[in-house]
Amino acid sequence: MTGARTAVLLAVASLSSSGAEVAGGAALRKIERIAGSAGDVLEDNPVGRLKVFVYDLPSKHNKRIVTKDPRCLNHMFAAEIFMHHFLLSSAVRTLNPEEADWFYVPVYTTCDLTPAGLPLPFKSPRMMRSAIQFISNKWPFWNKTDGADHFFVVPHDFGACFHYQEEKAIERGILPMLRRATLEGSIIIPPYAPPQKMQAHLIPLDTPRSIFVYFRGLFYDNGNDPEGGYYARFENFKNNPLFDISTDHPSTYYEDMQRAVLCLCPLGWAPWSPRLVEAVVFGCIPVIIADDIVLPFADAIPWEEIGVFVDEEDVPKLDSILTSIPIEDILRKQRLLANLSMKKAMLFPQPAQPRDAFHQILNGLAHKLPHTQSVYLQPGEKHLNWTTGPAGDLKPW
């Protein structure tokens, strides 16, 4: 894992009526076309540009885990499940692995949950090794490339580093077996936020945005920031009349975001959270406070144009920074956020829709084709060492 923070791993028809309304409501407002290649990428159709073979794994790697704990279907890491569902019925799927451009390995690594609903990533390396051993013994395709034409969806806080604390995730690094597969830094996807739930909390389009800065969440992150640091400094603004911030999470949370001009999206337990998705969908300009973060679909979504970036060290000056943004810039960001393609790209609706997050992932994979010859191993060539890694990762699963 590099020093850059990533929002998640790569990890996919028409929008359901609820999803269409969530994504499309703001289209009635003034919108602005996304200029240049970014707008074109968002509107690309990946069908016909790639073929994906979906491995049939033993159910212990996916379906059985969800049956045991269906809470996985609703948490922020659920993209790994819905991507699998999407690909099984997608027009890009091929049943003939000989004609595949990409091979998808459906492993659900975030479905081992605590009673509080938090994922435990510590068994994930063993689960991954088990899946790779299975496909490499049953099919020849992994062994031809050591996984370089394979992809996984690994949506945990620090992806395939499999730890929830940044320092320890960096120390672990990407699981050795996955280092040639399409992983961190390749395609960064948004966290899952339920479109139907957001649909249920829509308010009239002409509701004034009477809140200048909005934030709900903890002021302290004891996991990654035990001494308080910049994150605790949000508390300094709780009595500022321009800031509506609190540790409470009210039932009107979604409605409040639709009444706000700016929504804080700070680094918390991880470099990313559903706040970013919610802000884009609800037209609230995201204020991104996470140094070196790599954001979802950065080749397609013009984050610098729709968001505001504040260095972590500048949080004490947050009020003066945000109040100094010219009104023309605010209005332009709002017009861009009203673009329907922008909202669709952040959502994983059921069923899938053209230009949604599923299709942005496929676009990302299509843009990597054709594979170069370096992907394919020469006779006797090997890159992966099956016996390297922490002892706990090498135990059978």
Image: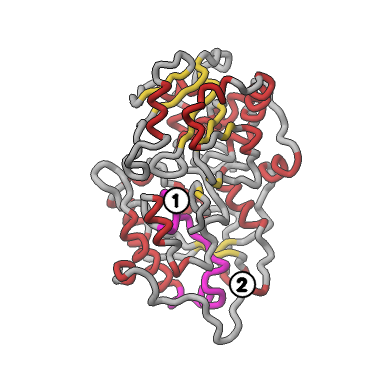
In the rendered structure, which amino acid carries the disc numbered 2? Answer: Val
Does residue 134 appear in this view?
yes
Residue found 28% across the figure and 52% down from its top? 68
Magenta stretch?
A: 136-161
Query: Is residue 372 highlighted in magenta?
Result: no
Whole-percent x, y for residue 53 in the image: 54, 64
Q: Residue at label 2?
A: 375
Most distant residue in the right direction = 36
Whole-percent x, y for residue 301 in the image: 63, 40
Whole-percent x, y for residue 121 in the image: 34, 55
Residue found 38% across the figure and 30% down from its top? 217
Answer left or right for 3 relative to 297: left
**Label 2: few (<14), some (14–19) or many (≥20) C-alpha neighbours in 10 Å:** some
Q: Residue at label 1?
A: 155
Question: Toward the viewer: 139 or 1?
Answer: 1
Q: Is residue 225 above or below residue 10?
A: above
Answer left or right for 147 relative to 116: right
Q: Is residue 215 above or below residue 392?
A: above
Quarter location, residue 59: bottom left
Answer left or right for 363 relative to 288: right
Q: CA–CA distance between discs 1 and 2?
A: 24 Å
Q: Which mark is residue 227?
A: none
